[in-house]
Image: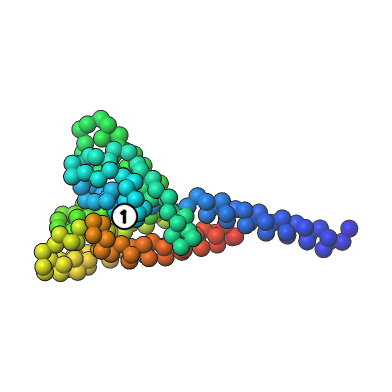
Amino acid sequence: MRASEIIGPLASEIRQAGVAGQGERLREGLRVAIAGAPNVGKSTLLNRLARRDAAIVSPHAGTTRDVIEVQLDLEGFPVTLRDTAGLRDATDPVEQEGVRRAWDAVTDANLVLWVVEAAGIETGLSLAQQQASGAQGSGADTQHWIVLNKTDLLAPGEGKQLVRFAGQLRSHTLLTISATSGAGIDDLLRVLAGFAERFFYRRARLGDA
């Protein structure tokens, strides 16, 4: 039997296996965790991105006690959004378990959206940076973004603080939104879609290597 008669079918099988592997990676999806302190608007953001009431929204801290998942299709790319419990030193056993699961979701994520309340920007950014730094060890490829929420509640002129403190975040992507009004959500989705495209392109390239 000639070599070409052997190589031809074998090459076809390899190509088909590569496509199947890429399809499996696409089905797994990009994992995005929404994390932060209690009452910063994480569940409102999840609902806004999902375009439905997937999570209960309440002014009372500790409402979210489990990880809530929503599947999104961003320009053809599958994304799994995970809303998590507010990160704090909880005393209630159930909330403690929720916080533990929140950290598990952060550890497992490809991208973490650290939500910060704009009105408490200085304290919120410091906390988010500490949390992001502490979570960096969970995976070298995990990206950490800062999402400043509730910008609709800022007094006139307070928006200048965002620019001033943004200089402290050179190592993080910074986005400003209002999950309640929807301001900045289109920009967030656009950036997320771009990240998803680069993520799957990189995974496909690594799979071909």
Model colouring:
rainbow
In the shown orientation, is residue 2 left or right of residue 174?
Answer: right
Whole-percent x and y of residue 104? 36, 42
Q: Residues within 10 Å of mark 1 (few under 14, many from 20)?
A: some
Looking at this view, is 71 or 114 the one in front? 71
Q: How many marks?
A: 1
Whole-percent x and y of residue 177? 25, 61
In the shown orientation, is residue 12 left or right of residue 123?
Answer: right
List the single residue furthest toward the right.
1
**Residue type pointed to by label 1:** Arg
Circle 1 is placed at which residue position?
Answer: 48
List the single residue furthest toward the front.
52
Whole-percent x and y of residue 30? 44, 54
Query: Where does the C terminus fall, quadrant-wise?
Result: bottom right
Residue at the spot x=30%, y=62% of the render?
Answer: 185
Whole-percent x and y of residue 110? 41, 53
Q: Is residue 83 visible to the viewer in this orientation of the structure? A: no
Residue at the spot x=28%, y=48% of the render?
Answer: 43
Q: Identify whether 27 is placed above or below 194.
A: above
Query: Where does the N terminus fall, quadrant-wise?
Result: bottom right
Q: Place residue 51 in its image quadrant.
A: bottom left
In the shown orientation, is residue 64 left or right of residue 5?
Answer: left
In the shown orientation, is residue 150 left or right of residue 100?
Answer: left
| Circle 1: element type | helix
Looking at this view, is 134 or 199 the one in front? 199
Residue at the spot x=32%, y=42% of the render?
Answer: 102
Q: Is residue 55 visible to the viewer in this orientation of the structure? A: yes
Residue at the spot x=27%, y=61% of the render?
Answer: 182
